[in-house]
Image: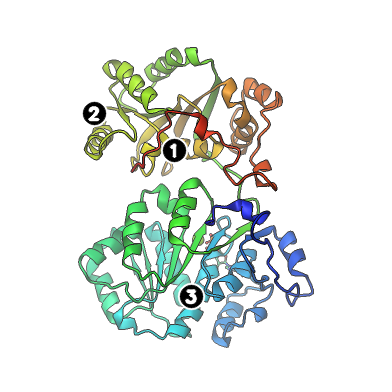
Amino acid sequence: NGPSGLVSAHGGSVIRGNGPSDTGSGLSAEAYCRRHEITVIGDNVPPPFTSFEATGFPSEILREVQNAGFSSPTPIQAQSWPVALQSRDIVAIAKTGSGKTLGYLLPGFMHLKRTRNNSQMGPTVLVLSPTRELATQIQDEAMKFGKSSRIAVVCLYGGAPKGPQLRDIDRGADVVVATPGRLNDILEMKRISLHQVSYLVLDEADRMLDMGFEPQIRKIVKEIPARRQTLMYTATWPKEVRKIASDLLVNSVQVNIGNVDELVANKSITQHVEVLASMEKHRRLEQILRSQEPGSKIIIFCSTKKMCDQLSRNLTRQFGAAAIHGDKSQTERDHVLSQFRTGRTPVLVATDVAARGLDVKDIRVVINYDFPTGVEDYVHRIGRTGRAGATGLAYTFFGDQDAKYASELIKVLEGANQRVPPEVRELASRGGGMNRFRRWGPGSGGRDGGRSDSSYGGRDGGRGG
Ligand code: ADP
Ligand code: MG
């Protein structure tokens, strides 16, 4: 069972292991976790370090922490440090600003002390980060806290000349912080070796996957010996992240801070939800398409390949549409995507799987012709518009058969200050009973236990991207 097996919190393994209960601060581990909304999943999970002294970090690190003016570890640090120090794989889920960076950096420094590798032969610690800005922030933090331990930190990111970065590598690096694209370029030039890496961090894993870095990440991981510790830090825990975690991590411990199940949609997207009968959808779709500025890039999501093909056939003459789904060959997909990117076919009809990793920046409208099998996918789909400060527009057709998602959808709409149509409230009150929290409960059959994918015969099962 991988880290996605949330059921283990109540089932097979033990939620709070047999960890001793004294945390050194007078508060029991249990009470500390309750107070800070920490939940852990895994076997024999050690109790949190509620003070810096409890960590056993060497004095030079403790001094830096003191210099920074920090009074105690943040909850994600308190619980991920003892796990990471046991050299175990970890998935840490906590919102932005919760101190995740030091959560992996300080145990990484301890790891470095143990390995005593030669930095000229390549890094021991590798941190992957989605953007240049984040990578340089991590580098700053690593240099600040690693200075007195003489830890050499190098940062590799795109959009800047390679020369100085290559020279930095040649001078020797204990820690490399890199964006996946640039690191791959440098790997292809054979100017860096990852054969010494034994501590791998995927920071902001959700964002890296959103940005389409999954293939690059997998390529990089192939260069790293399997005998390693892998740590994944993420603000959200969607399917894609769970999948890559189960592929890359071994016997991991999962640490959650707060209600990680809360879904948050981008507030710059205007979300229209319309309760419609199936037979009304097509007419309404055409109406929406006609009302858009000509040439606007639009994605229409539907749940079956058949529906994808049918819609794109119906729409293509008037609007310029093409379909993409798991039955299309890679060549076809590449062609369809490039036509979409250039705006030659501004309407793309897609299944979720085929749209995964799709990196098209100027999408104006997302239309959910069929509601997805979960509100998480909904948030993910509409997140394809409204990127990089632009405003986006989402239209969603919602039917009786989707009633079970109504209450959760309402939370997302309200969370983003969107109008909730009375018809959706009506569906929710009529006992669209399943809400995501119930799925956490004992005997829920796992995180996805309440889903009904299997009832959709034609659902796109192929791997996209
Ligand atoms: P995240 O990666 O979770 O978004 P960061 O690691 O960037 O968060 O940390 C956010 C801010 O909190 C940074 O300025 C960092 O220096 C600070 N910080 C980290 N650990 C602590 C701590 N134990 N106490 C107070 N502030 C901290
Ligand atoms: Mg961070």
Whether ligand 1 has any atom under 8 Å from the Cβ at mark 1 is answered as: no
- Kindly report the distance in space between the C-alpha atoms of the residues bearing marks 2 and 1: 21 Å
Q: Residue 422 appears at what percent x and percent y? A: 65, 21
- Kindly report the distance in space between the C-alpha atoms of the residues bearing marks 3 and 2: 48 Å
Taking 57 as reference, is 232 left or right?
left
- Kindly report the distance in space between the C-alpha atoms of the residues bearing marks 3 and 1: 36 Å
Taking 50 as reference, is 153 left or right?
left
Whether ligand 1 has any atom under 8 Å from the Cβ at mark 3 is answered as: no
| Residue furthest right in the image | 26
Q: Nearer the viewer, mark 3 or mark 2?
A: 3
Q: Quadrant of residue 320?
A: top left
Instruction: State the residue position of label 3.
Output: 108
Instruction: State the residue position of label 2.
Output: 344
Instruction: State the residue position of label 1.
Output: 386
Q: Earlier in the sequence, mark 2 or mark 1?
A: 2
Circle 3 Cα neighbour tier, 10 Å, few/some/many (<14 / 14–19 / ≥20): many
Circle 2 Cα neighbour tier, 10 Å, few/some/many (<14 / 14–19 / ≥20): some
**Residue 341, relative to residue 231: is it above or below?**
above
For this rendering, which residue is in front, 99 or 452?
452
The quarter of the picture showing ligand 1: bottom right
Q: Residue 109 appears at what percent x and percent y? A: 48, 78
Q: Nearer the viewer, mark 3 or mark 1?
A: 3
Q: Residue 214 appears at what percent x and percent y? A: 37, 52
Say if mark 2 contacts mark 1, CB within 8 Å: no
